[in-house]
Image (spheres, grey):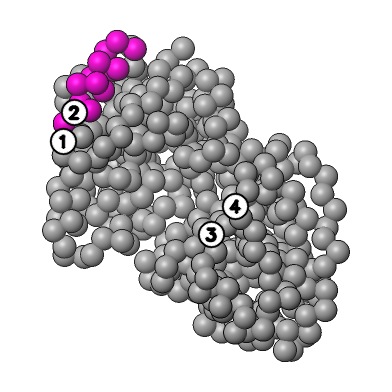
């Protein structure tokens, strides 16, 4: 059994990053790989320096075959660089967020300068650079930015969602649809970026135009008082219900019982390239998706291209109302094919990921050919 060391600032973090992704450790073991976590609790300069000797001991004492670091935060890649230099072990630098072009980093700032220096070190030292299709980075970024490097070392993992989703879990529960036409949102909100207020304006417009008879909207996750005030302002207190976050296993039947699943991508340019991991669960649930997102953004194009839902611009309440009616009236026909499901499936994702590990551990570049 080969061993990988994932450098992480989460003790229990595994492939996929969330509690619902824990089976991926089992999936990788089935493919010949054991996961060791190189836990780094403190990412200050002192904390990183303190972690280096412990990580070196892990690499040497546990017979690690490959070092894996991911971004973000950037310090994890810095540690990958140090371990590679000291131990000489193969290093896979995996990007789950961009370094230099991260939308949360101010262009021209000192932080961006530091990230640029680090990224150059990573690119010139790692055995392979890999990133997931859904992160906020333009295609061809690495080959354009580092034309001196062999292009075969840059590989975009053609799966949407780190670690994928277990479709078997979604197939097991038999869930009848809610009696009322139900729109469900499951997940977090982010100030000034991903928020429900303009969607609520669209619901109010829908109620004005089509009536609220037999309609309910439910939110599972973090909910702020300002959002509730917006519900009251729009007169939707009888139509909107808010629940605390629930374990992943409990949200599955909720999604399957719903008629329409709400995806909020907004119109902030920082979110242009993003496809949230929420999309994986929504696709697995097999229900239409309502994308409240600029149609020119990656998520909006994805929903329309794959015919898995309808899209409305966040600033257009009338368009949001019409999108709801398009699904409720039956004019939209959900048409997700097997290919789109495969791109989110944890089994297929871990097949690909294990193939990358196999190649890099042997000192080779993985280019998508599993026989290489």
Q: Residues within 10 Å of mark 3 (few under 14, many from 20)?
A: some
Q: Secondary structure at mark 2?
A: helix
Which labelled disc corresponds to residue 245?
A: 4
Q: Which residue is mark 1?
A: 46
The image quadrant that residue 279 belongs to is bottom right
Q: CA distance from mark 4 to mark 2?
A: 36 Å
Q: Which residue is mark 2?
A: 50
104 vs 299, left or right, is left
Examine the structure image and report whether residue 363 is included in the region drawn in magenta.
Answer: no
Which quadrant, please, contains the C terminus?
A: top left
Q: Secondary structure at mark 3?
A: loop
Q: CA distance from mark 2 to mark 3?
A: 35 Å
Q: CA distance from mark 1 to mark 2?
A: 6 Å
Could you tell me if the residues under marks 1 and 2 are in contact, i.e. CB atoms within 8 Å? yes
Please state the horizontal and vertical placement of residue 151, each as a whole percent of the image: 29, 42
Q: Nearer the viewer, residue 138 or 110?
A: 110
Q: Which residue is mark 3?
A: 222
Q: CA distance from mark 3 to mark 4?
A: 7 Å
Please state the horizontal and vertical placement of residue 145, each as a whole percent of the image: 22, 53
Q: Secondary structure at mark 4?
A: loop
Tell me the chief SS of the magenta region.
Answer: helix
212 vs 194: above or below = below
Mark 4 or mark 3, which is nearer the start of the sequence? 3
Q: Nearer the viewer, residue 364 or 174?
A: 174
Residue located at (83% from left, 45% from top): 174
Q: Residues within 10 Å of mark 4 (few under 14, many from 20)?
A: some
Residue located at (22% from left, 28% from top): 51
């Amino acid at each position: 059994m080969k061993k990988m060391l994932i450098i992480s600032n989460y003790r229990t973090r595994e492939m996929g990053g969330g509690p619902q992704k824990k089976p991926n450790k089992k999936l990788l073991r089935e493919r010949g790989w054991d996961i060791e976590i190189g836990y780094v609790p403190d990412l200050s300069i002192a904390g990183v320096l303190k972690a280096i000797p412990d990580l070196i001991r892990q690499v040497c004492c546990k017979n690690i075959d490959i070092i894996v670091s991911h971004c973000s935060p950037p310090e994890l890649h810095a540690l990958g660089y140090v371990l590679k230099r000291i131990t000489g072990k193969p290093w896979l630098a995996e990007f789950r967020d961009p370094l230099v072009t991260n939308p949360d980093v101010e262009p021209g700032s000192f932080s961006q300068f530091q990230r640029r220096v680090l990224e150059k070190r990573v690119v010139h030292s790692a055995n392979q650079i890999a990133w997931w299709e859904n992160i906020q980075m333009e295609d061809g970024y690495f080959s354009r930015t580092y034309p001196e490097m062999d292009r075969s070392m840059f590989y975009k993992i053609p799966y949407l969602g780190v670690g994928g989703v277990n479709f078997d879990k979604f197939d097991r529960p038999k869930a009848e649809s809610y009696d009322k036409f139900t729109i469900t949102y499951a997940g977090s909100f982010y100030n000034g970026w991903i928020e429900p207020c303009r969607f609520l304006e669209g619901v109010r417009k829908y109620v004005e135009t089509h009536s609220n008879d037999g309609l309910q909207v439910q939110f599972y996750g973090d909910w702020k008082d300002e959002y509730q005030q917006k519900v009251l302002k729009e007169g939707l207190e009888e139509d909107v219900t808010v629940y605390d976050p629930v374990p992943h296993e409990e949200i599955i039947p909720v999604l399957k019982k719903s008629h329409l699943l709400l995806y909020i991508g907004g119109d902030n340019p920082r979110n242009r390239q993003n496809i949230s991991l929420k999309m994986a669960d929504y696709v697995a649930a097999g229900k239409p998706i309502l994308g409240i997102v600029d149609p020119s953004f990656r998520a909006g194009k994805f929903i329309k291209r794959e015919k898995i839902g309808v899209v409305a611009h966040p600033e257009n309440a009338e368009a949001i109302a019409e999108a709801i009616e398009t699904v409720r009236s039956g004019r939209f026909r959900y048409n997700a094919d097997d290919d789109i499901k495969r791109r989110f499936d944890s089994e297929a994702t871990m097949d690909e990921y294990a193939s990358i590990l196999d190649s890099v551990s042997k000192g080779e570049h993985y280019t998508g050919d599993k026989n290489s």
